[in-house]
Amino acid sequence: MENNSFTRILAIESSCDETAAAIVENGTQLLSSVVASQIDIHERYGGVFPEVASRQHVLSILPVVKKCLAGAHMSLKDMNAIAVTSGPGLAGSLVVGLNTAKGLAIGANKPLIGINHLEGHIYSAWIGKEADSLSDFPLLILLVSGGHTELILMKDHLQFERLGRTKDDAAGEAFDKTARLIGLGYPGGPKLEILAMEGDENAFKFPIAKLDEEFDFSFSGLKTSVLRVVKDIEKKQADLPVADIAASFQKAVVNSLFEKTILAAQRFQVKGIIVTGGVSANKALRERFDTVDNFQVVFPAFEFCTDNAAMIGAAAHYRYLQGAFTNLDIDVQPNWEIRAA
């Protein structure tokens, strides 16, 4: 621990319906990670039920933290700091993680670092890699999840400029809503992706909105187009070609994400592209970016695409090096936007 750049951080994530804890060294090396999912619980509701989510976090948080520490054969005294997601997310869920982190920080006399969940998604790309493998800036971030779709210019570590965002539904939200339209259950996005593998992506020509702001996204019109097709087919009492609809919808979303990302990468002459967030696990999206040969394109490992605490620990490493610690009177920020240093 003599090295001033060394960090070992216990991180906690509870922004939605996963209760997670991880221990991360130097922003890249994962020593232990535990994620307790609530998918089976929320499946009966067809989506995340916030009050149920927060209650389940209360039940899971301490066992998850204890299991994480045990997995690394460490205790709180071995940590440099405690990091926690303090926003954005569901207020009730965030409160559980934040208050737990505060208690641990006070009890162990360790600094607390509140982390933006979106910032965590960005740094998920660093986990398991050499620290300097993504150090050539600027980088372009496509952050695409159930709640967020944004293009972000990363000028250096912790220096961000948002170039564009969705004007309505996030891409992941559009996946889930379209899945419901064609009769798929929760979680809709992954089920739609699997179904799309069986379909013809050229069966339907679903439109993507053209916006004045060239780096913004819009998916509500696409969802409406799917609804119109579904109703037209149902009026004819014909069988719904769900696989073809799923594949055609997915193609439209992937093309929109890809084309705007490449346009921004060219415009700002970036050194590389990071695609992150829950939707970055989508194989069709990954295959589309595999065609890029003039930019380095990096995706997180599949296990770090969806919500996890490892990404919070990775982001916290850079906040720690800045001495950007958080006061213990911090409150949750459910609508917290990405911040610059």
Image: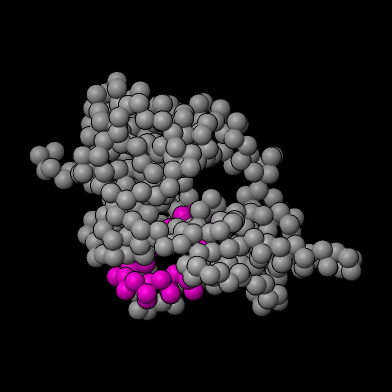
Q: Residue 333: where, in percent of width, then height?
A: 44, 37
Looking at the image, residue 62 lies above or below residue 192 = above
Task: Report the residue at 64% width, 43% height from top.
Answer: 47
Q: Is residue 271 magenta?
A: yes
The part of the chain drawn in magenta is 259-285
Task: Farthest residue to the left: give it.
Answer: 2
- For the question of whether residue 124 can be seen, the reply is no
Snapshot quadrant of residue 151: bottom left
Horizontal placement of 89 versus 23: left or right? right
Task: Farthest residue to the front: give it.
Answer: 212
Q: Residue 120: where, in percent of width, then height?
A: 38, 48
Snapshot quadrant of residue 42: top right
Q: Residue 97: where, in percent of width, then height?
A: 43, 31
- For the question of whether residue 47 can be seen, the reply is yes
Nearest the camera: 325 or 130? 325
Looking at the image, residue 81 lies above or below residue 161 = above
Horizontal placement of 105 versus 63: left or right? left
Task: Report the residue at 60% width, 31% height from top.
Answer: 51
Horizontal placement of 80 versus 145: left or right? left
Q: Residue 16: where, in percent of width, then height?
A: 52, 40
Image quarter in which the N terminus is found:
top left
Horizontal placement of 49 versus 303: left or right? right
Task: Farthest residue to the top: give it.
Answer: 107
State the count of labels. Answer: 0
Task: Report the residue at 44% width, 40% height from top.
Answer: 87
Looking at the image, residue 156 lies above or below residue 253 = above
Looking at the image, residue 272 lies above or below residue 101 = below
